[in-house]
Image: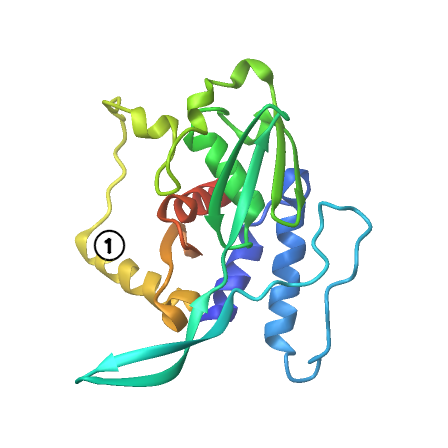
Amino acid sequence: DYTNSLIEEMNLCKAGGPLARTYEVLCHKLLENAFSEDLALWKEQQKSNNELKGNYMKQIMEEKAQNYKNGKINYVTEKVVKDSTITLTINNEISRNLSAIEDSLEEFAVGYLFNENMVKSLEDIEKIEINENHINVEIDDKLLKTKETVLCSDSSGGWRSKIKEIKPISSDFQVGADELINRIEELKNNAQIWQATGGTHVAGIVYKNNFIVKEDVSRHVAVDKVIGYGI
């Protein structure tokens, strides 16, 4: 369930470094989930550092809508995903705007840089700063590719969309068909926002007995988040 998913994420979370904020957010989510009735007015401790967000942003909102069925219009209230325009800036030189949920933005930044072949590991990232919906990252200049990494649609990556072939991987790792099917069900069961709205893509990563799920309105952003978490 949701509580166990948060506990699994905390057990895998790396302390310190550019992802230190992730651990703080997980602690807040777990405590809020466990003591929601007793701490109804509880909020995160305010921080003076601009990279830290003061309050936990809810990811679902309600909107008035019209439901047309059997020739009749019914006025209803629908739950929808609350997404925002996120700006990712690399070395104060190149930027990309995309639609995403304001959650796990540090993991997204790491996963995006890695999947766009701009870094090879977490050590290649010198700094990640988050100020509301702006992400500023610094990496070694020689690791940058070209500006085509940001000249792409919101529904796909940049450099990775140019890949024509994939080099063979030498590995004896195998996954059984039954486990794949079971993991798909587990993915859906842990997709809290998707269950409420049907409006997100869901990606998961499995490590030993841990199963971590990330959601977003953009498919590749969900994948970037979960890969960034794994890194």
Task: Mark 1: give few (<14), some (14-19) or many (20+) Cα within 10 Å.
Answer: few
Residue 113 location in percent, x, y? 49, 31
Taking 169 as reference, is 38 left or right?
right
Given residues 192 and 101, the one toward you in this image is: 101
Residue 119 location in percent, x, y? 50, 25
The image's colouring method is: rainbow
- Residue 142 lies, with reference to residue 54, above or below; the image says above
Taking 166 as reference, is 16 left or right?
right
| Residue displayed at 58% across by 32% down | 89
- Residue 99 lies, with reference to residue 92, above or below; the image says below
Given residues 123 and 60, the one toward you in this image is: 60
The residue to which callout 1 is attached is 180
Q: Secondary structure at mark 1?
A: helix
Residue 121 location in percent, x, y? 52, 28
Q: Residue furthest top?
A: 142
| Residue displayed at 60% across by 19% down | 140
Taking 190 as reference, is 11 left or right?
right
- Residue 144 lies, with reference to residue 22, above or below; the image says above
| Total numbered badges shown on the rendered structure | 1
Residue 195 location in percent, x, y? 37, 71
- Residue 3 lies, with reference to residue 75, above or below; the image says above
Given residues 87 and 69, the one toward you in this image is: 69
Q: Can you tell which quarter of the image residue 1 is in?
A: bottom left
Q: Amino acid at mark 1?
A: Leu
Q: Can you tell which quarter of the image residue 64 is in?
A: bottom left
Q: Can you tell which quarter of the image residue 212 is in?
A: bottom left
